[in-house]
Image (cartoon, grey):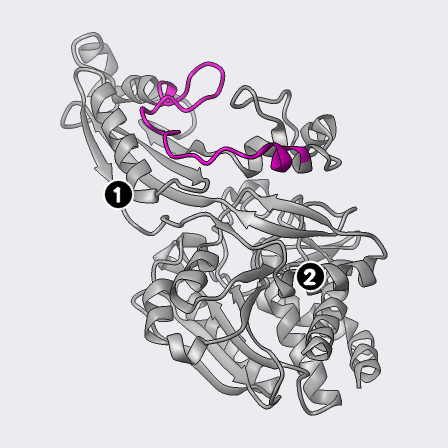
């Protein structure tokens, strides 16, 4: 049976790439209401493909935000049941002028498919769907019981996911979750991810005068919100990169000597990293390696700032207001609400004179950090499959990003999440010219088919 599946996948390589191009052509940007119709179209596309693959109980589940898509195939008595997770929503394509081609008209160039969402997460989440289709087309059945849950809000913090999981907990019950989201570390080393950081975020606004003022007539008489913003943002960190918010590190669980040694043993090259990201030098919290700062230390980052005139040329005004957006990546023992409250308190205590502060605090970004046990059978199976596909021992790495679903699955369903994505961290997701290596699409199809086969054999 397995040989037929692999032959089927090999014969349909071009079709798999065509399917991904079609999927990624849908501009399913979850954060912008202007893309509401495209979000609905993407959810329906996923549902239609699950029907074509032969899955049962396919349903587009409405939420208070964007819909989720569910499907199942539960006809393997005695075999494990896994819950496959992914997301069909994508980041905004901005800035558009930085793209070499239309972000929603994917193009293949030099073995890479370029387009918004091809790596995060449409390519990786399409892989298990196509693997299921291959099994049904060749054997008429799957080796294990599978439930699919594809959401449409991961890129905005999954605000509808917790109530959805809570409402459908019995329906979503499984032995563990297998996530198609969560990239491997780098292209030349297969890896399994054992942890991810949590997250919290907020936006704040500083207001000065009731309107923009002529900078010649009013300069020197009233505070400039942009100047105040720069001062307030600069005060969020000490000169050596440590977060200056009081109490920010109070609950951080320090790494053990063994954990630090494991990270130090990874083949992480600081110079190669700088070349990859195009930065002139490393910067960050003193006393920790680059890998530690990216994966296991908490951070506070300013994601956007704005105010005043942004067009060509000059406009001599003192703006009436300025704003900034902040997100933090959190580590074990840090709680999103607590960290957000400490940041708000810091902003209130350090707001410069002459401006007023307004903080916009939503729960959409909140997520707890996650760690899977090293001896989890699903994690061992992932390592076995990667070893077979790539002929090398996979590395054990951490994830600097955040997947809210892993903590939700553990808390609401009592199951762990194995990350099994075939995108890699250098594929510019969230940035212009996002790409997905075409060979990784084919590697992933083979690996997912092998994973289900080996899981069934292991019982």
What type of secondary structure mainly makes up the magenta span? loop
Q: Earlier in the sequence, mark 1 or mark 2?
A: 1
Camera-nearest residue between 225 and 80: 80
Residue 435: numbered disc? none
Q: Nearer the viewer, residue 212 or 365?
A: 365
**Who's the residue at 62% across and 75% down the image?**
129
Q: Secondary structure at mark 2?
A: helix
When the figure is inspected, residue 452 is found, relative to residue 73, above or below; the finding is above
238 sits left or right of 447 in the view: left
Q: Residue at x 49, y 72 (%)?
A: 149
**Residue 386 picture location, percent across and down:** 76, 59
Q: Quadrant of the C terminus?
A: bottom right
Q: Which quadrant of the figure contains the N terminus? A: bottom right
Spot the residue most to the left. Answer: 210
Highlighted magenta segment, given as a residue range: 233-261
Residue bearing mark 1 = 361
Label disc, if present, on residue 380 of the rendered structure: 2
Q: Is residue 293 visible?
A: yes
């Amino acid at each position: 049976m397995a040989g037929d599946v692999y032959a089927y996948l090999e014969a349909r390589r071009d079709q798999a790439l065509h399917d991904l191009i079609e999927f990624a052509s849908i501009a399913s940007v979850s954060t912008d209401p202007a893309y509401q119709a495209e979000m609905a179209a993407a959810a329906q596309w996923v549902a239609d493909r699950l029907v074509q693959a032969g899955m049962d109980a396919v349903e587009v589940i409405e939420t208070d935000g964007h819909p989720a898509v569910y499907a199942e195939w539960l006809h393997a008595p005695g075999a494990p049941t896994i819950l496959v997770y992914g997301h069909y929503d994508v980041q905004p394509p901005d800035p558009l002028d930085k793209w070499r081609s239309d972000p929603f008209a994917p193009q293949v160039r030099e073995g890479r498919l370029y387009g918004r969402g091809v790596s995060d997460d449409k390519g990786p989440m399409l892989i298990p769907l196509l693997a299921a289709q291959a099994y049904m087309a060749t054997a008429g059945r799957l080796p294990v019981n599978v439930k699919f849950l594809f959401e449409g809000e991961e890129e905005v913090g999954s605000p509808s996911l917790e109530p959805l999981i809570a409402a459908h907990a019995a329906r979503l019950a499984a032995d563990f979750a297998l996530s198609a989201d969560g990239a491997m570390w780098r292209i030349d080393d297969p890896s399994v991810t054992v942890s991810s950081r949590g997250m919290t975020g907020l936006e704040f606004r500083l207001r000065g005068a009731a309107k923009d003022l002529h900078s010649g007539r009013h300069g020197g008489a009233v505070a400039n919100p942009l100047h105040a913003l720069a001062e307030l943002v600069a005060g969020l960190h000490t000169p050596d990169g440590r977060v200056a918010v009081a109490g920010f590190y109070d609950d951080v669980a320090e790494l053990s000597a063994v954990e630090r040694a494991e990270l130090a043993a990874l083949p992480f090259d600081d110079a190669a990293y700088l070349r990859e990201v195009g930065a002139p030098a490393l910067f960050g919290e003193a006393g920790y390696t680059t890998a530690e700062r990216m994966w296991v230390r908490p951070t506070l980052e300013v994601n956007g700032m704005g105010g005043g005139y942004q067009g060509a040329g000059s406009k001599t005004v003192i703006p009436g207001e300025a704003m900034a957006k902040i997100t933090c990546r959190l580590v074990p023992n840090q709680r999103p609400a607590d960290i957000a409250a400490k940041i708000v308190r810091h902003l209130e205590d350090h707001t410069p004179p002459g401006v007023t502060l307004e903080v916009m605090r939503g729960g959409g970004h909140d997520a707890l950090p996650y760690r899977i046990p090293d001896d989890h059978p699903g994690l061992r199976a992932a390592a076995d499959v990667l070893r077979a596909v790539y002929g090398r021992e996979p590395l054990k790495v951490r994830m600097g990003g955040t997947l809210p679903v892993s903590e939700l699955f553990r808390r609401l369903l009592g199951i762990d999440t194995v990350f099994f994505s075939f995108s890699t961290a250098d594929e510019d997701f969230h940035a212009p010219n996002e790409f997905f290596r075409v060979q990784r699409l084919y590697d992933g199809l083979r690996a997912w088919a092998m994973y289900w086969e080996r899981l069934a054999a292991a019982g």
